[in-house]
Image (tube, helix red, strand yellow):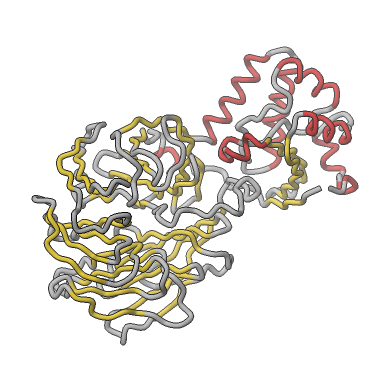
Amino acid sequence: MRCDMLSEDFSNHFEGTVDWTEVFSAAKRLNFWAVYWRLCLAKFKATAWKICIFSNYYRRSPTRWCLSEFCLPVVERERCSKVVHPFRVTCIRQLSTSQTLFTMYREYRDLRESGMMCEANSLLQQVETEHLLKMRTTNLLSVDRLTSRMEMDPSEQFFLFAEVTGIVRIAQMRTGEKNMTIIAEWVPRCVIPRTKITCLRWHPWDHSLFTSVGTDGRLHAWSAATMVPVQETELGYKLKYHSICNNPASEPLIAAAYSDRAGIAIVDLRDNIPCFRMAIGEIGISSFVEWSPREKDRLLTMSPTGVYVWDMRSFRVPVKKLVPPDDRSKLRGMKISSDGQHLFTLQGSNRFGLWHLPLMIFVQSTPSQEFSSVIDKTVEFDMFSLVQCDENYAFIPVYDLVHLMCLRTGNIPVHLHGPISGVDQCIYRRISQQLIICGIDSRPCLCTVPTDLDDLRQTPPPQPAPVIDDDF
């Protein structure tokens, strides 16, 4: 890293001389694996340097890192090392401007110089409270590993999921309750050994039925009352995901995506036979497939290169391909809002895109406040990490935390405290304002949603300043 880029603005904000050689040596002694200098260009064109240090421990748990102590003078760093852990990782997040950041830090440093450690720590806790929401989690069920995402019915009381043992279960959770009860379970004899169910869906208007697809290449329709398959459709290849058209006036079509083949299979539930397969040479393997709640004849499929919009009335070809204009990285997830007005996409560069679905136009793109250098580039998000949207917010699972995305203002990370070590799915119950999280390798847990969501609507979280990364 070039140290000749230090400007006068930096020296004006921090008094004293910083011995950069000592900073590097101290970081090496503490066995930190990387030291990044970040140049933040704020709205008022103030230039600041920040040391971002995190060890192998924080690399394994990337959500726990934040900014370390800000470029303390040599004497101050020596004093700090005797009071607290050297380069203690704090939960200071980027504020709206560098000027505010320096004001907060200068007050914090003055309190420490005066020996008022309690007041200094209280100031840090205040910053944490303002810029981090925390949710505690509790276990709901003691189940084995899940092979399918958990599916909630329209009444938000019944939940479907499949375990690694092949058991399909229905759990009930009444409004206001904080526990789940298994009311039905069945070991599907129709499933071939060493295969698994990958996706379960409730029928959109006939709640006594639900459907399933799996690696055996079959699509089944089940009776929720008897837990017995009533229909079976052979599709020939491993299936990954499927969606049922919510249009009682038309054919009850089911769109199913293959695990390792391009194209989408369309099945008529009445005839119980595959109708046709939609595929074009340049379209890759689809990860998600969803029918639009607003336009009943439109089907959306997501591939790594973009979201394809299909119209069942126009010769079964995509009418448009939606690609974020500011980012060409691979897509990792998508979700349609409950009213069918918005499409939410999660991009490979950890940016969240918002689309106006009826007009099929791009609205905005919001970068994650988790810096890109924290998240390992080799780790792919689980393609079943769905985004559960309501009218104002979306909950996006990212490792062992959840991003609370406000469609109007941006996103802030929500840290989870409890028996959870990885989140793959979020289910938001609007009737009780509860958040259920679960993962492929974890048990379903109930989160207590912070009570200050209304405050966020009035006072949106600060937007992060543009960041330029440069390794030394």
- The residue shown at (14%, 55%) is 207
In this view, 442 is above or below 87: below
* Residue 91 or residue 131, whichever sits in front: 91
In this view, 238 is above or below 175: below
Give the side of residue 61 with respect to residue 33, left or right: left
Q: How many marks?
A: 0
In this view, 95 is above or below 17: below
- The residue shown at (75%, 47%) is 39
In this view, 263 is above or below 451: below
User: Residue 332: percent from the left, percent from the top?
Assistant: 48, 59
Tell which residue pokes out farthest to the bottom in this image: 315
Give the side of residue 117 with respect to residue 434, left or right: right
- The residue shown at (70%, 41%) is 98
User: Residue 17: percent from the left, percent from the top?
Assistant: 89, 31
User: Residue 143: percent from the left, percent from the top?
Assistant: 30, 37
* Residue 372 or residue 61, whichever sits in front: 61
* Residue 91 or residue 423, whichever sits in front: 423
- The residue shown at (35%, 43%) is 145
User: Residue 23: percent from the left, percent from the top?
Assistant: 83, 33
Give the side of residue 279 with respect to residue 37, left or right: left
Tell which residue pokes out farthest to the front in this image: 193
Tell which residue pokes out farthest to the top in this image: 115
Give the side of residue 309 with respect to residue 276, left or right: right
